[in-house]
Amino acid sequence: MKSNKKCLVIDKRGHVGGNIYTEQVEGINVHKYGAHIFHTNDKEVWDYVNRFATFNRYTNSPIANYKGEIYNLPFNMNTFYRLWGVSDPTEAERIIESQRLKCAEPQSLEEQALSLVGHDIYEKLIKGYTEKQWGRDCKDIPAFIIKRLPVRFTWDNNYFNDQYQGIPVGGYTPIVEKLLEGCEVRLNTDYFAQRDYFDGIAQKIVYTGMLDEFYDFQFGPLEYRTLRFDTEILDKPNFQGNAVVNYTEKEIPFTRIIEHKHFEFGTQPKTVITREYSKEYEDGDEPYYPINDQKNNERYLSYKELADREENVIFGGRLAEYKYYDMWQIVRNSLDIVRKELKEA
Ligand code: UDP
C-alpha cells in the first residue's frame, strides 16, 4: 500500500492469520492451530515483527514426560544428569560418545539421532515422540528434522539457539490485523470456488495454499501430517507449570500438552490446555507438516516446475513451497519477495 498498490486478502476460513491465529478464552490467548513461539537470528526480521507487537521474554524450555519421568529439553546437562546422574560435562560427553552411532552421513532420522545423542536419549526422548508425530518408522523419516534440536553440554534449557525469541503480548491475531490495515479482507472465501473471477481481477496473486491443489493434483497428491487439537478449560490456575510438555512414549496417543497461559505468564483463575494428536492428512483436514521424504520431494519438484513458469503468481509458505518453515523464515522470504517485486514494478 505504501507503494500505491491495492491488496485484497481472501481466506477460506472465517478469520485472518492462518495458523498463527490466537483467540481469547477465559482471558488467555489460545494458539488455535498449535503453539507458535517466535524465534530468529535475523535482526531485520526481528525489528520488522516488533513494529507490530511488543514481544515478551518467553523462552521455550519444554519438558519431556517419559513414563512419568521428567526430563528437560533440549538435550543438555539437566537431561544428562537426570538420565545418568552425571554433573560433569566431560563425563556426559564420554557417555554419549560411547553410545553414539559412528556414521559419516546419516540417511534417516534414526541414524541422525543415534549419531547425535546415542541410544538412551534416542529410546526415551526421540523414538516414541517422532513416530507418533510422523506416523512412520524413524528409519523412514528424513534426517534433517532432528537437526533442529540442539545438544548442549551446559545447563541451558533454552530450546532455541537464536538470539531473539518471545511471544507477542496479546497474541498473534493483533499483529495480523495491523498488517492488514488498509487492505480489503474477505473471509469464508475459497479461491478455488471462484478462481476465474480472482484471476481476472488480480495483477499478481500470492498463493499460500497447497501447491498440489493449485495444479489440480495432476501429478498425484503431496502428503502432509495433520494435527487434531483437543482443548479443555480447567477450573484451576495451573495444570502443568510449563507451556509445553512433550509425551515421548509411544503408548500415550498425544504428542504434547500445551498450557497456553504460560506463554504470557498468565495469572487467570482458570487455565486452557490442548492435547495435540498427529495423524495422516486426509481430504478435508487442515494440512500442517509437509512430509519431505524422497517420494514426496520428487513429486513436489514436478509441481515446482509448473510453478516456476507462472508469471503472475507468487507461491509462499509451508504449503505452497512444501517446506517445514519456521515463522521467521516466512517473514524473511516475504520481505525479500516484496523488495524484488517493488523493484521490478
Ligand atoms: N523431537 C523429539 N522429541 C521431542 C521433541 C521433538 O524427538 O520431545 C523431534 C521430533 O522428531 C520432531 C522434531 O524433533 O518432529 C522437531 O520437533 P519440534 O517440537 O521442534 O517441532 P514442531 O512440531 O514444534 O514444529
Image (cartoon, helix red, strand yellow):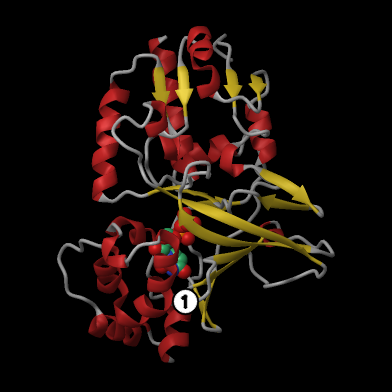
Residue 4: name its quadrant: top right
Q: Where is the N terminus found, in terms of image quarters?
A: top right
Quadrant of the rendered structure where residue 261 is? Answer: bottom right
Whether residue 160 can be seen here: no
Q: Residue at x 37, y 69 (%)?
A: 151
Residue 241 drawn above or below residue 170: below
Would residue 110 be found to the left or right of residue 81 on screen?
Answer: left
Horizontal and vertical percent for residue 174?
70, 37
Q: Quick one: 180 or 161, which is closer to the camera? A: 180
Total number of numbered labels?
A: 1
- Estimate the x, y position of residue 19 in percent, counting from the top left: 57, 43
Residue at image location 68% in from the left, 23% down from the top: 181
Q: Who is closer to the viewer here, 285 or 101?
A: 285
In the picture, which quadrant includes the C terminus?
top left
According to the picture, the residue beneath numbered tag 1 turns out to be: 249
Asked whether mark 1 and ligand 1 are closer than 8 Å, the reply comes as no
Residue at the spot x=47%, y=73% of the render?
248
Q: Quadrant of residue 311?
A: top left
Q: Residues within 10 Å of mark 1 (few under 14, many from 20)?
A: many
Would residue 20 appear left or right of 330 to someone viewing this image? right
- For ligand 1, the image quadrant comes to bottom left
Q: Label 1 is placed on what type of residue?
A: Glu
As displayed, is residue 176 above or below residue 21? above
The residue lying toward the viewer, choosing from 95 and 153, is 95
Q: Is residue 280 visible?
A: yes
User: Under tag 1, what secondary structure?
Assistant: loop
Q: Position of residue 247 (x, y in %)?
A: 52, 72
